Image (spheres, rainbow, N blue to C red):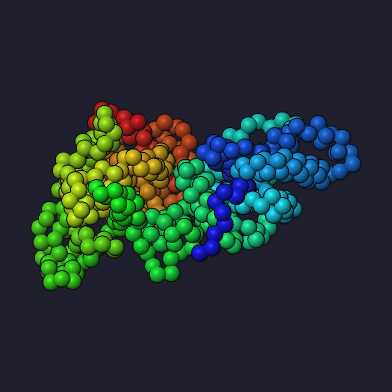
């Protein structure tokens, strides 16, 4: 496939309504790339004194448009010498009208730079409204910004088509790492044509091997496994294929052979899976597990403070599995267990049998599968059960992309909170739009209605997961 040269400078232009987190993302991208950041607000605020002289002649809306155009033209002129030096640029602006985009397209064409738009679209209205409420108190220089949700709704109606530019659309109410976001940006900058990527959905497809190598579109020949390039003992380049295991439940086909007249062997206990027995199977490889080995029904529910040994902090920042098992690839190459190999790490996790590989949780409608990667990998996420960040290992839903901490998925389904006289049940309450505030009855602080809670239906008592008390300890 013909691609643009990687050495051409990039213009990463932010796009989004006020309080969508685009300035935070822009700053993070510029810091990651170590490149200049040009912010429309900086220039806009420097000419704020003109607003009073314009208002007798212009309406407030016309004055705002005029100052925006002048500020945007100033940004483009500042950008020209930076691009001539071959520097990448991040431009932080709402990009709220078509003339601004046209000016960027002209700048890109004249400078030979690749233009990629990063559009911030929060999907969690509750979080977005909270950001709007928490924004810096307005002053005269911020009179052009909406201060209420009603004011912001007017901006939402003024959209325009932008199909003539490559674009990444990001839900900023989900966890987004700058390094991860730069991955599709670089791909778009190097791929001819105009493409639109939904960031989280696209990254999920990348994890499943559905995106073509070096490109942005889905592979026509179907999914492939990841490649890990390295060198063997002789110094020759080698390829190590690996993937994240999506386990599917087979109720009546547990006794199928692997195609070579050999019975299926459970990868956890190494015992045969009898014909007609329910089992779990990976959709992309020959991994099979007994139903009871995958779900570990006889294991005690693990409380947040009772993490398994291999998850605790160790001096060398390595997993500490009860049993070390090397994957088929490393075994075939006569290599030892490799802490940098996702397949070896997964095999050791399965064999250790300390945690369920699959969880059917009442708070989520799809099956949750464990996803574990080497500690050295950059693999961070935002837990959608409690809202806190996590890394390395998680429960992941391959149907919708939901992910959460191990501790959140394995919390007791029913437990007693010391501030309430009834037992509470973990649940995901229905989302409603008829209230501006959702409170935790234990700490009386705001809560995100998308997160899981402990709930008493008799008293309508709602409690953060983090406000539960297990034993005499509070989970923090």
Residue drawn at the location 48% of the way across and 36% of the way down: 446
Q: In this view, does 32 lie to the left or right of 240?
A: right
* Residue 346 visible from this viewpoint: no
Residue drawn at the location 39% of the way across and 33% of the way down: 442
Where residue 264 appears, as percent x and y from the top left, is 15, 64
Q: Is 191 situated above or below 353?
A: below
Q: Which of 162 and 364 is in front in this view?
A: 162
Where residue 114 appears, as percent x and y from the top left, is 62, 52
Q: In this view, does 179 lie to the left or right of 161?
A: left
Where residue 262 appears, as percent x and y from the top left, is 12, 68
Looking at the rendered structure, the number of numbered marks drawn on it comes to 0
Q: Is 207 situated above or below 420?
A: below
Q: Is residue 289 left or right of residue 457?
A: left
Q: Is 138 situated above or below 191?
A: above
Q: Residue furthest right?
A: 57
Q: Nearer the viewer, residue 470 or 308?
A: 308
Residue drawn at the location 68% of the way across and 58% of the way down: 160
Where residue 332 appears, as percent x and y from the top left, is 19, 55
* Residue 120 visible from this viewpoint: yes
The quarter of the image holding the C terminus is top left
Q: Nearer the viewer, residue 189 or 445?
A: 189
* Residue 21 sits in quarter: top right
Residue drawn at the location 27% of the way across and 59% of the way down: 247
């Amino acid at each position: 496939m013909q691609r643009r040269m990687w050495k051409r400078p990039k213009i990463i232009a932010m796009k989004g309504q006020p309080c969508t987190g685009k300035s935070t993302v822009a700053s993070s991208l510029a810091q990651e790339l170590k490149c200049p950041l040009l912010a429309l607000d900086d220039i806009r605020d420097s000419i704020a004194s003109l607003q009073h002289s314009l208002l007798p002649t212009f309406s407030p809306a016309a004055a705002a448009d005029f100052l925006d155009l002048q500020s945007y033209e100033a940004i483009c002129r500042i950008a020209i010498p930076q691009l001539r030096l071959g520097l990448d640029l991040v431009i932080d602006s709402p990009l709220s009208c078509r003339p601004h985009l046209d000016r960027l397209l002209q700048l890109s064409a004249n400078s030979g730079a690749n233009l990629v738009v990063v559009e911030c679209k929060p999907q969690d209205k509750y979080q977005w409204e909270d950001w709007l409420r928490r924004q810096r108190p307005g002053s005269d220089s911020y009179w052009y910004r909406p201060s209420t949700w009603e004011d912001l709704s007017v901006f939402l109606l003024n959209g325009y088509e932008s199909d003539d530019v490559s674009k990444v659309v990001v839900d900023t109410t989900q966890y987004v790492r700058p390094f991860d976001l730069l991955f599709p940006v670089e791909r778009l900058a190097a791929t001819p044509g105009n493409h639109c990527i939904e960031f989280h959905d696209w990254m999920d497809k990348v994890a499943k091997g559905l995106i073509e190598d070096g490109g942005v579109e889905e592979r026509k020949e179907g999914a492939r496994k990841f490649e890990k390039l390295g060198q063997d003992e002789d110094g020759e380049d080698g390829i190590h294929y690996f993937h994240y295991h999506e386990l599917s439940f087979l109720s009546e086909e547990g006794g199928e052979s692997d195609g070579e007249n050999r019975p299926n062997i459970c990868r956890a206990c190494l015992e045969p899976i009898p014909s007609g027995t329910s089992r779990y199977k990976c959709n992309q490889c020959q991994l099979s597990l007994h139903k009871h080995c995958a779900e570990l029904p006889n294991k005690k529910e693990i409380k947040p403070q009772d993490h398994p040994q291999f998850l605790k902090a160790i001096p060398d920042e390595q997993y500490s599995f009860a049993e070390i098992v090397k994957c088929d690839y490393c075994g075939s190459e006569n290599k030892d267990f490799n802490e940098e190999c996702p397949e070896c790490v997964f095999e050791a996790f399965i064999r250790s049998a300390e945690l369920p590989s699959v969880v059917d949780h009442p708070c989520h409608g799809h099956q949750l599968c464990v996803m574990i990667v080497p500690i050295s990998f950059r693999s961070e996420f935002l837990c959608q059960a409690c809202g806190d960040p996590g890394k390395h290992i998680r429960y992941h839903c391959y149907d919708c992309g939901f992910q959460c901490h191990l501790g959140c998925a394995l919390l007791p389904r029913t437990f007693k909170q010391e501030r309430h006289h009834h037992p509470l049940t973990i649940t995901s309450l229905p989302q409603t739009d008829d209230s501006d505030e959702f409170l935790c009855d234990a700490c009386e602080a705001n809560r995100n209605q998308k997160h899981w809670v402990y709930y008493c239906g008799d008293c309508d008592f709602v409690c953060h997961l983090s406000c539960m008390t297990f034993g005499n300890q509070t989970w923090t």
